[in-house]
Amino acid sequence: MVLLYSIIIAVVTGPLIAVLSGISLVNLQRGLEAISSIAKTPQKGVLRQLKPYFKQLDLILDNAFGGSKFTISPTNILLMGVIILLLALLLENSEKPKEVVVRKKTTTIPSKSEDKHD
């Protein structure tokens, strides 16, 4: 029964992480497009006041991505899946309580049988 459960988890986890990484990459791509559109088009209201910051952020992101459009490839999906797994491991290990092992200093008292042999 445990083996069947492990097989089911292994079969379901891989595609689930691939879908999750694909969705997060699409959201990243849409976010980059939104920042670029806010920086390059006229805005009203609060966005007009924030436009200089969006322009600077757009410039930084253009330099980071080489000025080309961000496209999603299967390699990107796999790498994002690895990042998601590493974050999951990090979060799981950070939740465990840290145990501190304290050793008490023990003093040995020589027994009478040891004194006789000396």
Image (cartoon, rainbow, N blue to C red):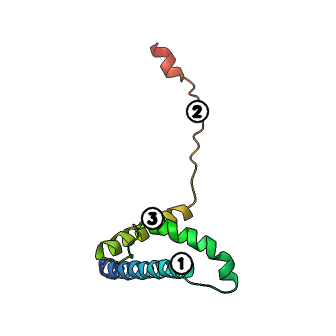
Q: Nearer the viewer, residue 6 or 110?
A: 6
Counting labels gives 3
Query: How far from the left and from the top, in percent, is residue 2?
Result: 34, 77
Query: Which is more foreground, mark 2 or mark 1?
Result: 1
Residue at x 51%, y 78% (from the top left corner): 36
Q: In the image, is residue 50 above or below residue 111?
A: below
Q: Tell me the kind of residue under disc 3.
A: Asn
Q: Earlier in the sequence, mark 1 or mark 3?
A: 1
Q: Which residue is mark 2?
A: 106
Query: How far from the left and from the top, in percent, is residue 42?
Result: 60, 84
91 displayed left or right of 17: right
Q: Which residue is mark 3?
A: 63
Q: Which residue is mark 1?
A: 35
**Within the image, what quadrant is residue 19 found in?**
bottom left
Tell me how far mark 3 sits from mark 2, CA to CA. Answer: 62 Å
63 displayed left or right of 11: right
Quadrant that contains the N terminus: bottom left
Q: Nearer the viewer, residue 114 or 96?
A: 96
